[in-house]
Image (cartoon, rainbow, N blue to C red):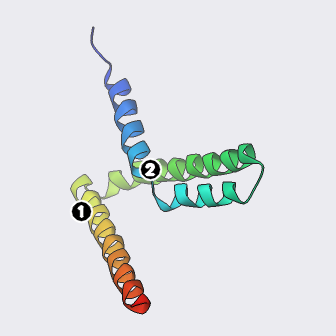
Amino acid sequence: MTISPDLLLLASTFSTVFLAELGDKTQLATVAISGTSNRPLYVFLGSASALVLASFLGALLGGGLAEVVPAQLLQLAAAIGFLVIGGRLVINALATKQEQS
């Protein structure tokens, strides 16, 4: 039995996004909103809809962008973006730690 390339792409995308979303700011915001509300279904529907729309826009823009910009350059830009975000988080954490001392 062979698995179709489309199914492999679907599974790969699902697992990558699922793991990336665990513990990120979006999930933490959803937990915080849900904690202040007694309507978890509406919090779920709102956060799920937002994630679906953001993912749709990313897929749409990524597909169009990949036709103009080489894939390696897009990956490099994404990696640099993650490094910048990570660096800012570390700097903010260190600044917060110094303020608390």
Task: Provide residue 21's location: percent of width, then percent of height.
Answer: 45, 51
Q: Is residue 3 left or right of residue 57?
A: left
Q: Which residue is mark 2?
A: 22
Q: Amino acid at mark 2?
A: Leu
Q: Please report the residue visible at 69 percent of the width from the left and 45 percent of the height from the top.
A: 45
Q: Residue furthest right?
A: 38
Q: Is residue 35 left or right of residue 77?
A: right
Rendered position, 79 above or below 54: below
Q: Secondary structure at mark 1?
A: helix
- Is 34 or 46 nearer to us in this picture? 34
Q: Quadrant of residue 73?
A: bottom left
- Is 33 or 5 nearer to us in this picture? 33
Q: Secondary structure at mark 2?
A: loop
Q: Is residue 101 left or right of residue 55?
A: left
Work out whether mark 2 precedes mark 1 in sequence or the reverse, and give the earlier one. 2
Q: Please report the residue visible at 71 percent of the width from the left and 46 percent of the height from the top.
A: 40
Q: Amino acid at mark 1?
A: Leu
Q: For the residues carrying marks 2 and 1, which lies nearer the camera in this image? A: 2
Task: Provide residue 63's location: percent of width, then percent of height.
Answer: 40, 48
Q: Residues within 10 Å of mark 1 (few under 14, many from 20)?
A: few
Q: Please report the residue visible at 67 percent of the width from the left and 59 percent of the height from the top.
A: 33
Q: Residues within 10 Å of mark 2 (few under 14, many from 20)?
A: few
Q: Please report the residue visible at 38 percent of the width from the left and 84 percent of the height from the top.
A: 97
- Is 63 or 46 nearer to us in this picture? 46
Residue 76, labelled with which disc? 1
Q: Is residue 42 left or right of residue 24?
A: right
Q: Quadrant of residue 10?
A: top left
Task: Provide residue 89's location: percent of width, then percent of height.
Answer: 37, 75
Position of the C terminus, as image quadrant, is: bottom left
Q: Residue furthest top?
A: 1
- Is 48 or 74 nearer to us in this picture? 48
